Image (cartoon, rainbow, N blue to C red):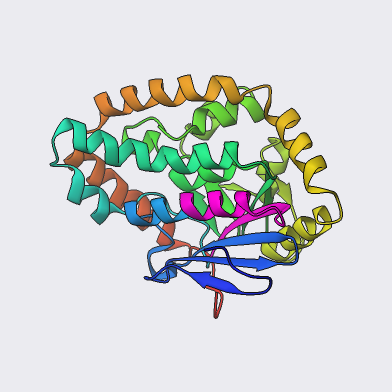
Amino acid sequence: MAAGPGVAVSTADNLVITEVVDRSTVITLNRPERRNALTFEMMAQVTSAIELAGGDESCHAIVLTGNGAFCAGIDLESLSSHSADDVEVRGTTIYDLPQSMVRALVSVPVPTIAALDGPAVGLGMDLALACDMRLVGADGWMMQGWARAGLVPATGGVFFMERLAPGVLWRAIDGHPRLHASHLVALNLAESVDGSALDAARARANAYGGISRLAMESYVRLSRSTYADQLDAHLRAAAEMQHTLFQPGKYRERAVELHDDISQRGAGRPRPNA
């Protein structure tokens, strides 16, 4: 059930919060102690929240954000629990569920805004890139992450990066730098904002409330028309490549190193009552 105006609705485990304010919907990843690393259950919840918001005629924009970090990628324990599954089950879980979030973001009929007040790494960066807009605050940054773990992104990271800034991929995997707001602006990957990215995203989403829903849907269709048909083939190919590359033990070792690196310099400050 969709939230009413000004009402926050949480999933049973309180890990994904949906709030409707005026004519916009804010979806918050609420697992700050794990830097909002996504379990497969959370992925299904995020997809559902996006689809429900898009189906609400009063919603003119969706903001995706995180409490503290934006998203540190896939939860390692959740991934490990499925790594021993047979090929068919593993494929359905490890690829279909993450990709469902990306497909929801590019098919929802209203504009999407990623608000980064903390890091977006790996899958987190892919989700941000899949949004129509990315607003980054002082503590926000992105890191590709996948190549460091010996994988390719099966969630559209290469596709969206090449669409937004052709050739930047090679710089993003050269030493896996943290791309802070100034870098992201220079690379045409995001906008930098003063103060809170979430506040800026809310303000923009609310401004879109003054434009008719039908007009917003038309702008969305036009803006995504250049790539919507190509994305599906890319996601299928990327999943096949990642399936070939994925070695559970080695991935976990490298991913732990990456998560440790993120924590050394902080991952954004959790918001109270998010």
Quarter occupied by residue 8: bottom right
Q: Is residue 224 above or below residue 191?
A: above
Vertical relation: 164 (above or below) 20: above
- Check the image and report above or below for 175 versus 37: above
Residue 65 located within the stretch drawn in magenta: yes
Horizontal relation, residue 75 to residue 61: left or right: left
**221, 55: nearer the viewer:** 55
The residue depicted at 35 percent of the width and 27 percent of the height is 239
82 within the magenta span: no
Say if residue 120 shows up in the picture.
yes
Q: Residue at x 70, y 47 (%)?
A: 182
Q: Quick one: 191 or 223, which is closer to the camera?
A: 223
Residue lying at 77% horizontally and 35% vertically, measured from the top left:
218
* 31 sits left or right of 212 in the view: left
User: Residue 51 placed where, x, y %?
Assistant: 54, 49
* Residue sitting farthest toward the right: 210
Tell me what residue is drawn at x 68 percent, y 71 percent. 5
- Please state the horizontal and vertical placement of residue 49, each as a whole percent of the image: 52, 56
Q: How many marks?
A: 0
Where does the image place residue 29, in percent across and percent down from the top left?
49, 62
Q: Is residue 240 left or right of residue 178?
A: left
Residue 117 visible in the picture: no
Query: Where does the magenta region start and end?
Result: 47-66
User: In the picture, which quadrant includes the C terminus?
Assistant: bottom right
How far across and how far down the image is residue 142, in percent? 55, 47
